[in-house]
Amino acid sequence: MNTSILLATTARILNQFRHDRRTVALMILMPSLLLILLRFVFNSEAAFSRAAPALLAVFPFAIMFIVTSITTLRERTTATLERLMTMPIGKLDLLFGYALAFGVVALVQVLVAVGISLTWLGLEIGGSVWLLVVIAGLDALLGTALGLFASAFARTEFQAVQFMPLFVMPQVLLCGLFSPREAMTPVLEWLSNIMPLSYAVDALTAVTTSSDITGELVRNLAIVAACGLLALVLGAVTLRRRTP
Amino acid sequence: MTSSVTTSGAVEVTGLRVHRGKRLVLRDVSCSIPHGSVTGLLGPSGCGKTTLMRSVVGVQIVSGGSVSVLGAPAGNPSLRNRIGYATQSPSVYADLTVAENLRYFCAVLRAPRSDVQRVIAEVGLGGHESQLVSSLSGGELSRTSLAVALLGKPELLVLDEPTVGLDPLLRDELWTLFRSLAARGVTLLVSSHVMDEAARCERLLLMRDGALLADDTPTSLLSLTGTGDLEQAFLSLVRAKEAA
């Protein structure tokens, strides 16, 4: 890995965003808009406070997944990737460069969503706000990492969009948002246990209900971070310098 | 490092076979490209020019034979900042400006920042530095892509149809640039499907249907076939091969 090439890649991607302000606005505001919508659908602060923590994990995760998989697919299908692969850039430089750039966007997105939820929408949390931001940010990064990985399996942008329901929806359905994970049938609970989003939602729920930093909370965070890292490394493995 | 390769060509291709899908697109191609020369790779669209170039820069999965570049096997990590490659479809980022593109690739190659201004001047893009690539004309776009290949100090330039869509004056300027680079010791492999560019090369590789028809100088090709121009020479070689 070469830090200066990695950072140049991050700067390049952020520059690309700078020229596409509409995408940036959509990325940053979308989770907040959905949370605002949800707040008024529930029409009760109490009901919103119960669902909001899980959704602070789900919305950034899903949005970062889509944005990342499309952007990297674009790099794979245009000749820029082929050109880069003839140059002295490591695969991890490229992938971590991507993750860092999208991580910056994800952090802003999460800060806005948490800010709006805590002030205007009346979300009450028992634990640390900063821990909430860290968990939601880590979760958006997980979405980015999975998106990077998934883009390797898509040949067209149509396929990449279809991976959203495939990679994201099962995790959303099984993460405990719709029914408690312990109450699921054993097969579903087992599936839920192997999906990283479940741990992110558990961690967020823990932070909103209590200020204790328990061993379980730390373990859940470690699982989310490890899954993100694993997805990035797998993404690097699926990147080939030589293609058919 | 350079002393060990002076005895052979800058590029040595021996018995190269490449499959794309089930189709054999290169059938036992062997050729040698001398140091400090401009070699034209000519043939109709679909004859395997791009596949041969991809094999030389080391991004093509090959089925057999060997390709040696500047004394190392093609694709060797030591070659990654010694080769400049411009793909046929322009490989630059459409949502960045000309200068931002060049600055990024400059950072990846760890070339001096002053290279950006130099290559902009070399391809005649002065005044377009801060223009978004997506707003460039076709000719300007392909020159931006060519400019990236000129960054750093490449010893070998592999340029896939760099002059397509350029007005005759610009085309002439680029060929002057290619010859001056060759005079400095740079080896150039330039593909084209227009025969009138062939006369500008010191050596020609004529390809058809995945096989090499000729590897010679333009003058000796004309005398060998007894024809007046290279288009006729190409036709006579094709007919001779089909009769055999």
Image: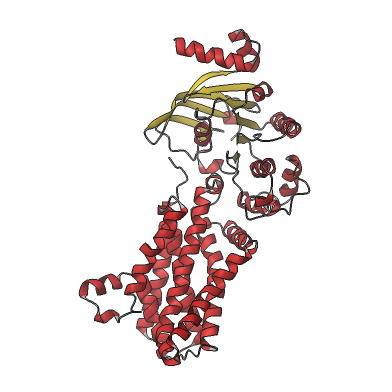
Q: Where, by quadrant of the figure, is residue B205 drawn? A: top right
Q: Quadrant of residue B38?
A: top right
Q: Is residue A233 visible?
A: no
Q: Residue at point 54% right, 60% down? A: A97
Q: Residue at x 58, y 29 (%)?
A: B10
Nearer the observer, A205 or A235:
A205
Considering only vertical position in the picture, is A135 above or below A73?
below
* Colour pattern: secondary structure
- Point out residue A127 in the picture as x, y percentages from the top left corner: 45, 89
- Residue sitting at the far left: A186
Residue furthest right in the image: B127
Q: What is the x, y in percent for residue A181?
A: 29, 79
Image coords of residue A214 (percent x, y): 37, 86
Q: Residue at x 33, y 73 (%)?
A: A173
Q: Position of residue A31 (x, y in %)?
A: 50, 75
Apparent side of residue B8 relative to residue A201 in the rendered image (left or right): right
The quarter in which the C terminus of chain A is drawn is top left
Compared with residue B233, is residue B183 higher up or lower down, i.e. above or below?
Answer: below
Q: Nearer the viewer, residue B236 or A152?
A: B236
Q: Is residue A45 left or right of residue B166?
A: left
* Vertical order, B3 against A22 (above or below): above
Res. B229 visible in picture? yes
